[in-house]
């Protein structure tokens, strides 16, 4: 059942009410008997788990980050990479 918030125009009291969508809105303040108006409040709704935009597509994770990194056994040893001749691009 949704929670609705109402604010009194006279005393500024905020009243929370658990109401069905089909219920009539509250109109009278329980504290000062002034008129209530429905206000829009911050929602505490949070999507958890996988399958939502926030968890699957909304982050900064790129395709390269999601692939497995090569293990140390399949990577080239550092000494083999240093023994290759360096390519100079300055000479034209």
Image: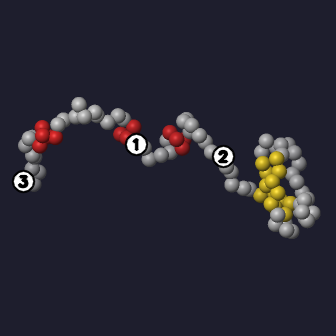
* Point 42% across, 44% down: residue: 61
Q: Residues within 10 Å of mark 1 (few under 14, many from 20)?
A: few
- Residue 91: assigned label: 3
- According to the image, label 1 marks what residue? 62
Q: CA distance from mark 3 to mark 1?
A: 37 Å
Residue located at (9% from left, 46% from top): 86
Residue to which mark 2 is pinned: 45
State the SS at label 3.
loop
Residue, x 54% and y 44% (percent of image)? 54
Between discs 2 and 3, the one toward the N terminus: 2
Which marked residue is nearer to the observer: mark 1 or mark 2? Answer: 2
58 shown above or below 74: below
- Seen from this angle, which residue lies furthest front? 72
The image quarter containing residue 36 is bottom right
Q: CA distance from mark 1 to mark 2?
A: 27 Å
Q: Comparing marks 3 and 1, which lies closer to the viewer?
A: 1
Asked whether the beta carbons under mark 1 and mark 2 sit within 8 Å of each other, the answer is: no
- Residue count near mark 3 (Cα–Cα under 10 Å), binned few <14, some 14–19, many ≥20: few
Drawn side of residue 22 relative to residue 77, left or right: right
Residue 68 versus residue 20 in the image, above or below: above
Task: Using the image as rendered, state which of residue 88 and residue 67 is in the foreground.
Answer: 67
């Amino acid at each position: 059942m949704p929670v609705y918030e109402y604010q009194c125009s006279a005393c500024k009291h905020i009243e929370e009410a658990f109401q069905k969508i089909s219920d009539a809105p509250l109109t009278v303040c329980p504290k000062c008997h002034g008129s209530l108006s429905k206000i829009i409040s911050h929602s505490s709704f949070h999507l958890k788990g996988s399958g939502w935009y926030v968890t699957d597509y909304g982050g900064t994770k790129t395709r390269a980050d999601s692939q497995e990194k090569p293990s140390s056994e399949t990577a080239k040893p550092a000494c083999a990479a240093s023994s290759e001749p360096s390519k100079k691009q300055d000479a034209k």
